[in-house]
Image (tube, rainbow, N blue to C red):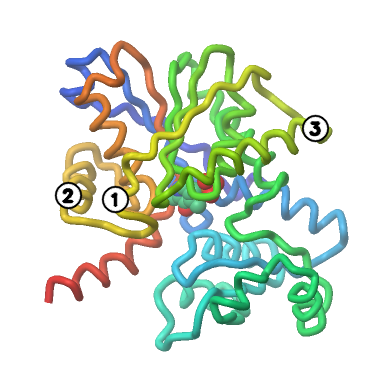
Amino acid sequence: MTSFFAVPPLQEINSAIAHQNNVQLYVLRLDLIHPFVNGNKWFKLKYNLEAAKAQNLTKLLTFGGAYSNHIYATAATGNLFGLQTIGVIRGEQTLPLNPTLDFAVSQGMQLVYLDRQTYRTKQTAELQASLKNRFGDFFMIPEGGCNLNGVRGCTEIISNSASLIKDDFDMICLACGTGTTLAGVALSLRPKQLLIGFPVLKGGEFLKPEIETLLAEYLSSDLPIPGDKNISWELIHDYHFGGYAKVNEELVTFQKEFEKLYKIPLDYVYTAKMFYGVMDLIQQRYFNNCRILLIHTGGLQGNLGIEKRLKKRLK
Ligand SMILES: *Cc1c(COP(=O)(O)O)cnc(C)c1O
């Protein structure tokens, strides 16, 4: 199953400001593991696919917004492994399809639209039953791949590249949406490592209890725990730039500069915000004398939609 995927390269960022503060920065490029199923989404899908297979189900159904990286990755994964996929999309259909949904359809995904109010009821037995009525038996993956299977896959993000990561990092940084990836990485930490999550949603304070619940559920399951049991993690809430998928001039300039300097493309929704935050915190001397691993969680497909929006704004 993993043979489709490359081991992600580990790339050093030679930044003057980091050197001045004695910070060593490395990026784990999950954006390069596969051309379509890139980033953390593969890790969140992996054990969901295995669970579907164990139940002899060949149809996956999942949920997401119209620009969702998770929808994109699920469609591509289904195509790769010969599974049918159904994407339940929040909101009305707009034509022509945006690049994300256009790609999903090209991978064989069947799209269904739910108005926002109905979408909010997606976890109810009633809606699940109506979907079963319509599509027959399927394996349901929650929005964003946020379940224990998703967490389990993410416990392998770092060990998957163990051959590269010989150094002991003091800190590991990543961007958070649902916090599933953070929970998985947290369960793989070595003693004394600190994991820092950068929520990309405004008012992301709700995330802490949700991550705590995910971790507690995982720890009380019999799923494998590769790391130290004394997990230390925190969230830094100062870099959401106004909320989910919101961008401003400053972020766009940073993204462009960063790519030019270090040859690392960043997506605007997640990784650009986290990288901006880390560089800013080094500048503020919040981080110094340490070795930091930044996880590039991918998501670059989303830039197509955002860049279209930015162009419109400039007109
Ligand atoms: C989905 C996504 C995240 C957030 O992952 P969670 O597990 O939901 O916290 C981070 N980065 C990128 C690029 C993503 O697509």
Quadrant in which the C terminus is drawn:
bottom left
Mark 2 or mark 3: name the one nearer the start of the chain.
Answer: 3
37 relative position to 299: left or right:
right
Decide: is 124 above or below 181.
below
What's under tag 1, amino acid-wise?
Phe
The residue under the point 46% across, 55% down is: 35
Viewer-side residue, 13 vs 245: 245
Please identify the residue farthest to the right as the structure is shown. Answer: 55
Q: Which residue is mark 3?
A: 220
- Residue 96: mark: none
The residue under the point 47% across, 14% down is: 168
Viewer-side residue, 96 vs 212: 212
Q: What element does badge 2 sit on?
A: helix
Give the crowd class for mark 2: few <14, some 14-19, many >=20 residues within 10 Å: few
- What's the CA distance linking mark 2 and mark 1? 9 Å
Give the crowd class for mark 1: few <14, some 14-19, many >=20 residues within 10 Å: some
The residue under the point 62% across, 79% down is: 110
- What's the CA distance linking mark 1 and mark 3? 36 Å
Viewer-side residue, 311 vs 125: 125
Q: Which residue is mark 1?
A: 241
Q: Quadrant of residue 291?
A: top left
The residue under the point 62% across, 48% down is: 44
Image marks 2 and 1: residues in contact by CB distance under 8 Å: yes
x, y percentage for residue 133? 82, 83
